[in-house]
Image: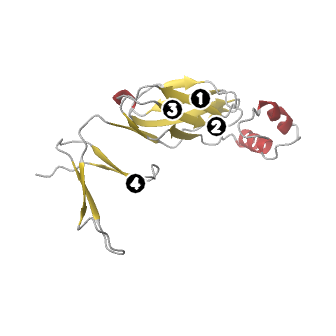
Amino acid sequence: MQEGEDLSGYRDKALRGISLPGLGLSIRTAALTGTLPKPIIWPEPSSVIAKNMPVTIWCQGTFESLEYQLHKEGSQIPWDRQYPLLIKNKAKFSTQFMTMDYAGRYHCRYSSPAGWSELSDPLELVMTGVYQNPSLSVLPSHVVTLGVSITFQCWSELGFGTFMLIREGKPSLSFTLDSQHHN
């Protein structure tokens, strides 16, 4: 089997006991227990997107998936619906231009013959490039000694917002804090 190969032809074979060990077992186990695996959600290229740049949200379920829904927190109805791609365990939700409307927290879920899955873990999409860059300092000094505690202080001339500290070169390592007002 090659990466990216269409697996739809294997699905029925696996359920009849021919090749692809584990695939048929996991689907049958989920159907027997009445629970579906929680979907996995991730962004591409990153969860931090510059204004007007494209972003894709992926949702991965099982090979039995019939429909995928993207839910944005704060909305009563699904933000978007998609049918599975050729490889049926994934769906792609895309926008060509990141705007404030797309910033927020998302979950996805999928339906299968066994019913609807639970919601995925949350994905936070953050848009940059709207406001002037904040300032960042390190206390007590920008020179760090092993074993000494440091504090990062981030501030903006605007009196609101959330700050996200991202380690350069490691987009998956980030910290988010709500701002605190200081005079």
Task: Report which residue position mark 3 lands on.
Answer: 56
Distance CA(mark 2)–CA(mark 4): 30 Å
Residue in the picture at 75% in, 32% down: 6
The percent coordinates of residue 9 (x first, y second) are 81, 30
Q: Nearer the viewer, residue 94 or 4?
A: 4
Which image quarter: residue 127?
top left
Asked whether, in this view, residue 132 is left or right of residue 51, the answer is: left
Tell me the crowding category of disc 2: few under 14, some 14 to 19, or many 20 or more residues within 10 angstroms, Cα based. Answer: many
Distance CA(mark 2)–CA(mark 3): 16 Å
Asked whether, in this view, residue 37 is left or right of residue 42, the answer is: right
Asked if labels 4 and 2 touch by Cβ distance under 8 angstroms, the answer is no
Task: Report which residue position mark 1 lands on.
Answer: 68
Q: Which mark is residue 30?
A: none
Task: Report which residue position mark 4 lands on.
Answer: 167
- The three-letter code of the residue at mark 4 reads Arg
Asked whether, in this view, residue 89 is left or right of residue 154, the answer is: right
Residue in the picture at 43% in, 27% down: 76
Distance CA(mark 1)–CA(mark 2): 8 Å
Mark closer to the chain start, 1 or 3? 3
Q: Nearer the viewer, residue 173 or 160?
A: 173
Task: Report which residue position mark 2 lands on.
Answer: 61
Tell me the crowding category of disc 1: few under 14, some 14 to 19, or many 20 or more residues within 10 angstroms, Cα based. Answer: many
| Mark 4: secondary structure | loop
Distance CA(mark 1)–CA(mark 3): 14 Å
Question: Which quadrant, please, contains the N terminus?
Answer: top right
Q: Nearer the viewer, residue 137 or 78?
A: 137
- The three-letter code of the residue at mark 3 reads Thr
Which image quarter: residue 130?
top left
Asked if labels 2 and 1 touch by Cβ distance under 8 angstroms, the answer is yes
